[in-house]
Image: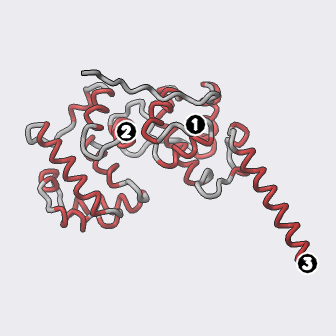
Amino acid sequence: MTTRTSRAPAPPENPPSTEVVREIHRRLRRRFGPLEPPPRREPLEELLLTVLSQNTSDVNRDRAYAAMRRRFPTWEALAGADPFDLAEAIRPGGLANIKAPRLLAILREIGERESSSLDLSWMRGATSAKVRDYLTSLPGVGPKTAACVLAFSLRRAALPVDTHVFRVARRLGFLDQRTDAARAHAVMEAAVPPQLRVRMHVGLIRLGREICRAGRPRCEVCPLRDLCPTAPSILKQRVTLHGRRRRAGKDVA
């Protein structure tokens, strides 16, 4: 039987240099203040919290998680929950009918692997590669969720790539159009020095939420404008559009 090996995604032709990466980190820290990660949680808690965070805001994620823990105060109670009851508990987080069976499938798989235990504290002494492989082999767990557990619970040098990080990284030239979100983790971790990865993740998320937005990026106030290969074209388009509107207004007058 032939074994297929996955080929590592190639970086863009001219990705940011290490010096530029460090400068990006410095400017993000200057703009947003200390780029501290979220409070440290146990691995299982971080895993389930990250699943709840999918396609929702932090506020709604936290509301859903708090309601879930009130309804099912122990992991064993949660693992034995009725899917409908769990979906009702996590309804504030959105996509409850999808997330509830996913959470239960994850807990069921962990219980089978860990001899009915739901304790993942062994991960603290395991290699990052072993933890990543274990997590991504769980049902519905992808590289972003695994990276969140590594970065936030285990304080490892991981860089989770969520929607905001992916968008900003592509505009900054870290990722080309061929690199999808799943493969972006390997590219970003190769480009960013280990000691900067977690804080870079926090900074890029802040930038993506507040400035480098999906619909209308605010390039004019971005601290990375002169380092961003995408900013000139976006700003030029705005100048052109503004000029057309002014001319149209004069024609009407």
- Viewer-closest of 99 and 194: 99
Report the residue marked by disc 2. 143
Which circle marks residue 253 in the picture?
3
Is residue 133 rendered to the left or right of residue 213?
A: left
Q: Which residue type carries mark 3?
A: Ala
Q: Which mark is residue 176?
A: 1
Q: Earlier in the sequence, mark 2 or mark 3?
A: 2
Instruction: Give the answer, above or below, for where 62 lies relative to 91.
Output: above
Quadrant containing the N terminus is top left
Secondary-structure class at tag 1: loop
**Foreground pick, 29 / 214:** 214
As measured in the structure, the alpha-carbon distance from the residue carrying label 1 to the one carrying label 3 is: 45 Å
Looking at the image, tell me whether mark 1 or mark 3 is earlier in sequence order. Answer: 1
Q: Secondary structure at mark 3?
A: loop
Instruction: Single out the mark in the foreground, 2 or 1.
Output: 1
Q: Residue at horizontal 33%, vertical 28%? A: 128
10 Å neighbourhood of mark 3: few (<14), some, or many (≥20)? few
